[in-house]
Amino acid sequence: MRRLLFLSGLILMTKMAISQNSELLDSLKTWSVIQYNAYMSYFSEHSHKIRIEGDTLIDSIRYQKVWINETEDDNLHWRCKSFIRDENGKIFYKKKRDNDGFYDEYILYDFNAEVGDTFTTLTSMLTRTRVKIDSIFYSNIFGDSIKTWKVLLFTDYTGTQGAESYWYEGIGSEKGLLYTGEIILHSGKALLCYNYGDSLIYRRKGYKDCYVSVGTNEMNPTNTIDLYPNPASSSITLQVPYRSFIVKITSITGQDVYKNLMTENQKTIDISTFNKGVYIVTIIYGNGINSKLMTKI
């Protein structure tokens, strides 16, 4: 009986250590991130994995090495082109230049931030994004109650409007570890899988694997689908070459927010109640599927 209780307690303690580890930069963690690209009639999605291993000195400051693998092979093809450090809950990030040297360091997260605090970060394309803390609460998207920051992102092209994003203590954001300020037209990123050691803690709804590589390109002009305006604040208009089709709109976190059968080749959809952020608009017709990214501002 004692042995059974001991084993049960050990299993429970192990589970808690895995799912509630609050140290973000842990070498046992792996983030799989999926990237969507949609422009005109082209849609693709491709994933890559991120892990932290080893450290180095840059300008007398110690950083941990960030490794990225864009292939399915977990044992090969890892490359290090960026570095990260944790300064008492404030996470700093630094990227290598393609030729030589480094870009300036910038903040990815501030896990000490309170409601109303702001700072400036960068996207993966090195464009500026202003971050403002909107609210702080606890969520269970990863199985256990985790401290969560809802943040608003303000970029040059969104002006005074803000897209929404979420930080999760010890995990990163809904876009994975590195992409806190990411708002790019016709493109989006989302956390596909999150592992602690050999344990899969999270996998994005609708996906069976932690590696994805899909691309379609319909060059026939009769298959062209127009979606405008994009970004949009209150409504979008779809113009398609089909008499009947299904429209499905999915948030970047995998939640279906709209689905309807259309019988007109031009349709306006009210998105005023949607949260700000990036959405996938999927058109399902007789013999195929076409998808586009849409930004709600």
Image (tube, rainbow, N blue to C red):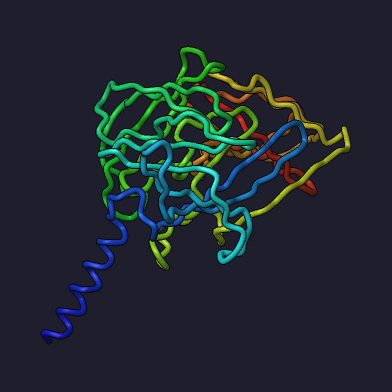
| Coordinates of residue 261 in the picture (x, y in percent) | 66, 38
The answer to whether residue 166 of the structure is visible from this angle is: no
Question: Residue farthest to the left?
Answer: 2
Q: Which residue is nearer to you in this view: 144 or 125?
A: 125
Question: Residue farthest to the front?
Answer: 60
Q: Residue at x 40, y 48 (%)?
A: 64
Query: Quick check: 91 above or below 265?
Result: below
141 sits left or right of 34 in the view: left
Q: Residue at x 51, y 37 (%)?
A: 95
Q: Residue at x 66, y 38 (%)?
A: 37
| Coordinates of residue 207 in the picture (x, y in percent) | 56, 56
Identify the image quadrant of residue 165. Answer: top left
Quarter placement of the N terminus: bottom left
| Coordinates of residue 193 in the picture (x, y in percent) | 48, 55
The answer to whether residue 98 of the structure is visible from this angle is: yes
Badge count: 0
Question: Residue farthest to the top?
Answer: 160
268 sits left or right of 134 in the view: right
| Coordinates of residue 106 in the picture (x, y in percent) | 43, 30
Query: Quick check: 137 above or below 46?
Result: above
102 sits left or right of 13 in the view: right
Q: Which residue is nearer to you in this view: 148 or 118?
A: 118
